[in-house]
Amino acid sequence: MNILVTGANGFIGQKAVLAFRTADFNVYGTVRSTTNPKNTDFIALPENPTCENWERILEEKDIEIVVHLAGRVYPEKDSLREFEKSNKDLTLTFAKGCLNKNIKKFIFLHISE
């Protein structure tokens, strides 16, 4: 079974990827940058991914389950709109892409202060 973990190099994402790999799932992760070369199955995303970007990834990797962990945890000073854009708008775009590709399960987890 193919699983996509967004925010795969984040605090929770790293642990989720390890747990799924340990359970013998095929795991792919999306990240903002691929600075960790040992994780060759990480997919770097554009700054503001579109629904089409997401659909292409889901289709190319034949994803069945999505665990959405990506997002900003702390709003930067004077940038509440960027915080909202990252955590609400991009999540909605991603969820629409998952609906369009008939993803079996969409698990969403977000932490905030």
Image (spheres, rainbow, N blue to C red):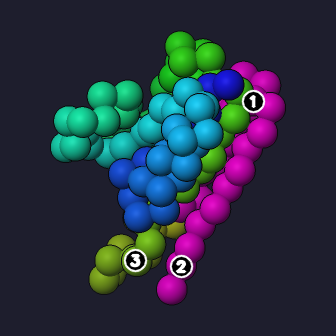
User: What stretch of residues is rendered in magenta?
Assistant: 87-113
Queried whether the magenta region covers residue 107, the answer comes back as yes
Numbered badge on residue 103 = 1
Of residue 85 and residue 19, the one placed in the foreground of this image is 19
- Name the residue at 39% across, 58% down: 10
Numbered badge on residue 112 = 2
Place residue 99 in its image quadrant. Answer: top right
**Considering only order in the chain, which callout, 3 or 1, is on the residue closer to the N terminus?**
3
Asked if marks 2 and 1 touch (Cβ < 8 Å), the reply is no
Of residue 77 and residue 107, the one placed in the foreground of this image is 107
**Left or right of 108: which side holds 99?**
right
The amino acid sitting under disc 1 is Ile
Q: Identify the secondary structure beneath mark 3.
A: loop
- Name the residue at 36% across, 51% down: 9
**Left or right of 71: which side holds 63?**
right
The amino acid sitting under disc 2 is Ser
- Name the residue at 30% across, 83% down: 77
Q: Nearer the viewer, mark 2 or mark 3?
A: 2
The amino acid sitting under disc 3 is Pro
Q: Nearer the viewer, mark 1 or mark 3?
A: 1
Q: Callout 1: 10 Å neighbours few (<14), some, many (20+)?
A: some
Per the image, the residue denoted by label 3 is 75
Q: How many marks?
A: 3
Residue 107 sits above or below residue 84 on the image: above
Q: Position of residue 108 (x, y in %)?
A: 67, 55
Numbered badge on residue 91 = none
